[in-house]
């Protein structure tokens, strides 16, 4: 079984069967059967590798992983704001455009997952909604509302992580967006720089992944 340096199975070349003459020729048939035998051995090896233990290492599904390192705020409580990204961590058939659009090249059923860091600087608990859009249109019944506690003190806001995942059928060149609104403009999406004592990584304001799950499902998209 031939593999390349990325650990993916290579497609076996079609067997060379040549062109038979008008009369039976043992050498031609012997060579043809040998070529066919070698071809099917390679195909059998590929099937065994794919469906045997650890066969998933050869599967190359579309995926994308993205994050943002900026604070995102709302100018008012009556506008819906797309969540934006400034970094692509991984991309294989899923790409970022217009800062907020997660585009797919391959049709299929996808799983969109995110975690978002929220800050509330008000003295009251607040609500924040997150939902999904497909090709710029809100997806019905995709909204979730999160309650954000009041700040702990004037210099110490409350901090909450919100997280969701959502399955959606997508055609080639479709895109997904995460959208939010807040009950108070003092609620925002926040990031933190790397820390010390102890040394610790920076906190992205948003982390999201869009992963291929299966070919298009039979459910209504």
Image: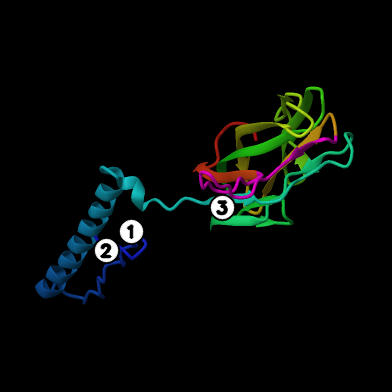
Where is 78 relative to 199, above or below? above
Can you give x and y, in whole percent of width and height, for residue 9 in the image?
Answer: 33, 58
Magenta stretch: helix, strand or loop mostly: loop
Q: Which residue is mark 3?
A: 106
Residue 162 in magenta? no
The answer to whether residue 94 shows anywhere in this view is no
Q: Which label was assigned to residue 21?
A: none
User: Is residue 180 something that shows in the picture?
Assistant: yes
For the residue pair 180 and 137, the one nearer the viewer reads as 180
Give the residue drawn at x 81%, y 22%. 124
Going from N to C along the chain, the mark reached first, 2 or 1, is: 2
Question: Toward which corner of the image does residue 76 lie, by quadrant?
Answer: top right
Residue beneath label 2, please? 2
Residues tagged 2 and 1 counted as in contact (Cβ below 8 A): yes
- Report the quarter where the N terminus lies: bottom left
Can you give x and y, in whole percent of width and height, for residue 210 in the image?
57, 45
Furthest residue in direction left, as rendered: 26
Q: CA distance from mark 1 to mark 3?
A: 20 Å
Q: Which residues are magenta?
A: 185-205
Q: Is 215 on the left-hand or right-hand side of 205? A: left
Residue with the mark numbered 1 = 9
Mark 3 lies on a secondary structure that is loop
Q: Residue 164, position in %: x, y?
A: 61, 32
Q: Is residue 52 above or below residue 21?
A: above
Q: Residue at x 29, y 45 (%)?
A: 54
Residue 17, quarter of picture: bottom left
Q: Earlier in the sequence, mark 1 or mark 3?
A: 1
Residue at position x 72%, y 29% from top? 143
Q: Residue at x 82, y 25 (%)?
A: 123
Q: Position of residue 55 (x, y in %)?
A: 31, 46
Residue 195 within the magenta-colored segment of the rendering: yes
Q: How packed is label 2: few (under 14 Cα within 10 Å), some, or many (20 or more)?
A: few
């Amino acid at each position: 079984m031939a593999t390349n340096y990325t650990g993916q199975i290579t497609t076996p070349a079609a067997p060379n069967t040549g062109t038979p003459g008008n009369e039976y020729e043992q050498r031609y048939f012997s060579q043809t059967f040998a070529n066919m035998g070698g071809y099917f051995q390679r195909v059998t090896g590929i099937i065994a590798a794919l469906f045997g233990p650890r066969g998933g290492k050869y599967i190359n599904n579309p995926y994308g992983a993205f994050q943002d390192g900026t604070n995102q705020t709302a100018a008012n409580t009556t506008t819906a704001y797309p969540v934006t990204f400034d970094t692509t961590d991984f991309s294989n058939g899923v790409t970022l455009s217009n800062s907020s659009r997660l585009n797919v090249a391959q049709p299929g059923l996808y799983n969109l997952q995110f975690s978002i860091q929220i800050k509330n600087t008000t003295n009251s608990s607040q609500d924040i909604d997150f939902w999904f859009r497909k090709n710029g249109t809100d997806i019905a019944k995709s909204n979730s509302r999160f309650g954000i506690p009041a700040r702990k003190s004037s210099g110490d806001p409350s901090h909450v992580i919100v997280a969701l995942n959502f399955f959606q059928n997508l055609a080639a060149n479709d895109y997904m967006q995460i959208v939010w609104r807040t009950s108070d403009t003092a609620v925002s999406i926040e990031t933190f720089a790397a820390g010390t004592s102890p040394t610790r990584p920076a906190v992205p304001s948003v982390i999201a992944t869009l992963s291929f799950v299966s070919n298009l499902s039979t459910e209504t998209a």
